[in-house]
Image: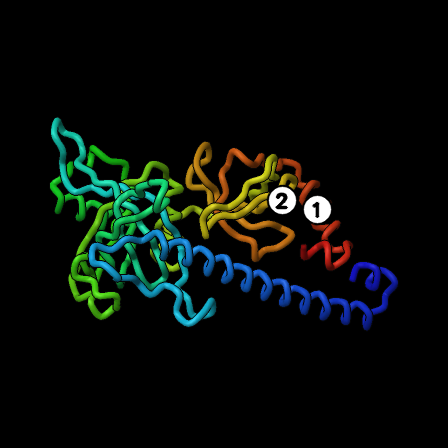
Amino acid sequence: IAKAEKIGNKKIAENARKAEIAASILAQQCNDASRRLENWEELIRIKTQLKFPKPNTTVDLMGRGAESARVLMKRGEITFIVGRGILAGLKTVKQHFFVFRDLLIITDPPTHDTKHGTRYRVQALAIGVKAYRNESRVRSALDHLKVPHSLVDMGKLLVIRIHRYCNADNYDGTDHSIVNHKKHMVIHLSEYSDAHRWFEAFEGGEPDKHAVSEIDYYCKATKPYSATQQDELSLFQGDIVKVECKPDANQGWWKGFKLKDESSRGWFPIDCVSHIEDRRVIERFNTKLSTSDLSSSRK
């Protein structure tokens, strides 16, 4: 494109632009297919690890194939507040959450043994889960639990409202057994970025409107990072990333996308990057992308 424009050949430049758009669409399709395959492989692992109280009980995660399989948004240990503890502390419970776009599976923390490997004992399943981070909702939930507001950091709390809930003992392997039963939970997180990430997971990947967006902040990967969650961004040393969200400037995780492929978007640990203060670095990088071979620019 750059060469064609330089010599003033508009027809070649226009054809090159169409080819670039086609290559971009193809790259996006390949990325989407790769994510579906990764999700499918993760679902296979999860299904073998879930243990229900009733024998021969299982949950349909796979659908009829990778295209119709449930999409795992996030998984991990969760601490939720159940009341005020002894000596003015908090009474909390730790459990493990598997958050899908249309389903929440709540289990005990994992157990490990040489015979069965890692296993998660299922405690409950839920459908119709909505997350809230606005202060009025959080305060109301804390008041219901009789927890003084001074004991917590509001920015690290997340309230989830469940419309349909079922204990694992009553689950028969179908979504029909997850009956109408409203329930609220107050989740206590260790970092501000965790609150944003779990909110987005419960909301099906929708950005957290309470997050402060960055307009013009870039960083460079100083060391590689391999994503371990569906909402994370893998980094290679030297990658240039535009930061979209910085819940905490000094610790935790930031959210952004790679300049060489805007479809590569997610959260990454801030100790793997350094801030780019010289704007000429970004300008040189963009110039290099615009004049490089399409196959390398879309790698």
| Residue at mark 2 | 240
Say how the picture is coloured.
Answer: rainbow
Would residue 156 appear left or right of 147 to someone viewing this image? right
Q: Residue at x 38, y 60 (%)?
A: 204
Residue 242, image x and y in percent? 57, 47
Residue 144, image x and y in percent? 12, 47
Residue 84, image x and y in percent? 13, 36
Q: Residue at x 47, y 46 (%)?
A: 228
Mark number, residue 285:
1
Would residue 48 appear left or right of 281 to someone viewing this image? left
Q: Amino acid at mark 2?
A: Ile
Q: Secondary structure at mark 2?
A: strand
Specify the quadrant that holds the C terminus: bottom right
Q: How packed is label 1: few (under 14 Cα within 10 Å), some, or many (20 or more)? A: few
Would residue 270 appear left or right of 29 to someone viewing this image? left
Residue 49 seen in the figure: yes
Q: Secondary structure at mark 1?
A: helix
42 in relation to 30, above or below: above
